[in-house]
Image: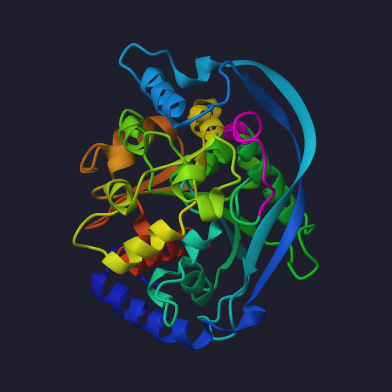
Amino acid sequence: MLPISSPVALLATLSLANSWVHAIWDQQNSCIDFFVDVPVDTVTYNPLFAPFQNQNEATEFLLRFTRRDAPPATSMFGSPKNISTTFNISTRYCSPAEQSYGKSIDTVLLLTHGLGFDKSYWSFNFPKDDPRNYSFTAHATLAGFATLSYDRLGYGLSQHEDPYNIIQAQVELAILTSLTKLLREGKLHSGIPIPKKVAHVGHSFGSLLSNGIAVSAPELTDAVVLTGFSHLTQYLQWYVHSTAYHLASLNQPKRFGNFESGWVTWGDQFYNQFNFFTWPFFDPKLLEYAEDNKWPFTVGEFMTSGFVPVVAPEFTKPVLLMTAEFDLIFCGANCTDIVTAPAEQAFPKAELEVYMQPNTGHGMNLHFNATGWYEVVFDWLCVHGF
């Protein structure tokens, strides 16, 4: 693949990729959907607050834990308790078609989605008759990479769990760690070979977890790609304030009417736009689709995110930090010149590269130019020997 610095070559590669994606989109034999029992040995933290009884309690709680003199969110949880259990996780493995650039299937990209989505974020089915421009997985297989995406605990088709006590950030890091081990040992599925290399690719909260792998289990990853992310945390409150901790059971009762009060979301499509999109660089119909198909997030995972380690002083492998120019959640809606220094502090010895995708909001895969950042990722991986 040609260097990132060559825009003409990048456009030519992108055009070639687009012509092939439509041709192989419906080839069912290139993807396997399956469930895997993922063993986990980790800890959970007991919340020092009671489950919300109604919307008023939820909104007031959010106000209190984010006020200017509030203690860290992690202080609202008690001592750790060991858990040893198994979670049933929904996964999708996609392998390159024979038409891909002649590259062997050596590398698996392990994809972890963020808050508000399930694994379909990586292959957003819009529009249904031709979704090629919003499918990272389709373009990845064309570039010669296999992908493994999964629904995080409680999301999509994966096992439903307690949103206060079980679906916590460190539990999700343990699931990603165990899933990676199963992949590397060839124990996921009979149709999935042992890869030579694994690169962890995340979006938003999924990037936090992928960053956590580099700290807690660096031997399990060969490269880390962090999209829709930075190591700045002061703007996270902008996001969570906009949600008002709207109970998912009230927001979309047909889909989430039976969900516990610890599952929360934002109010409507315009709050969705505020957090994830930048006008006029997206299709308004895609925004409507994203709102109709959104997933709530849990109080437990958001408030325990501080338990995931992000500083990797001894990590020496390649790291690509990819921000959106107008990312509200991690940059206060302007990422220009503010993300590199914190990233260098988190990865002082890594082969670090920082890239900013222009004309894009936090939901990087939902903008007109999404295929552009796909190619940047693939180019970067190839430069580093993947």
Left or right: 128 with respect to 32? left
Q: Position of residue 378 (x, y in %)?
A: 44, 65
Between 160 and 346, the one lying in front of the other is 160
Between 278 and 154, the one lying in front of the other is 154
| Chief secondary structure of the magenta portion | loop
Does the stretch in magenta take in 165?
Answer: yes
* Image quarter of residue 347: top left
Left or right: 261 with respect to 60? right
Residue 174 showing in the rendered view: yes
- Which range of residues does the magenta coloring cover? 158-170
Give the mark count.
0
Question: Which quadrant is the N terminus positioned in?
Answer: bottom left
Rendered residue at 42%/34% (across/down): 245
Does the stretch in magenta take in 292?
Answer: no
Residue 368 showing in the rendered view: no
Above or below 97: residue 298: above
Above or below 160: residue 379: below
Q: Position of residue 205 (x, y in %)?
A: 47, 42
Q: How is the image coloured?
A: rainbow
Rendered residue at 76%/71% (across/down): 191
Q: Position of residue 239 (x, y in %)?
A: 34, 37
Above or below 29: residue 189: above
Left or right: 212 with respect to 87? left
Q: Position of residue 184 (x, y in %)?
A: 72, 54
Left or right: 167 with respect to 137? right
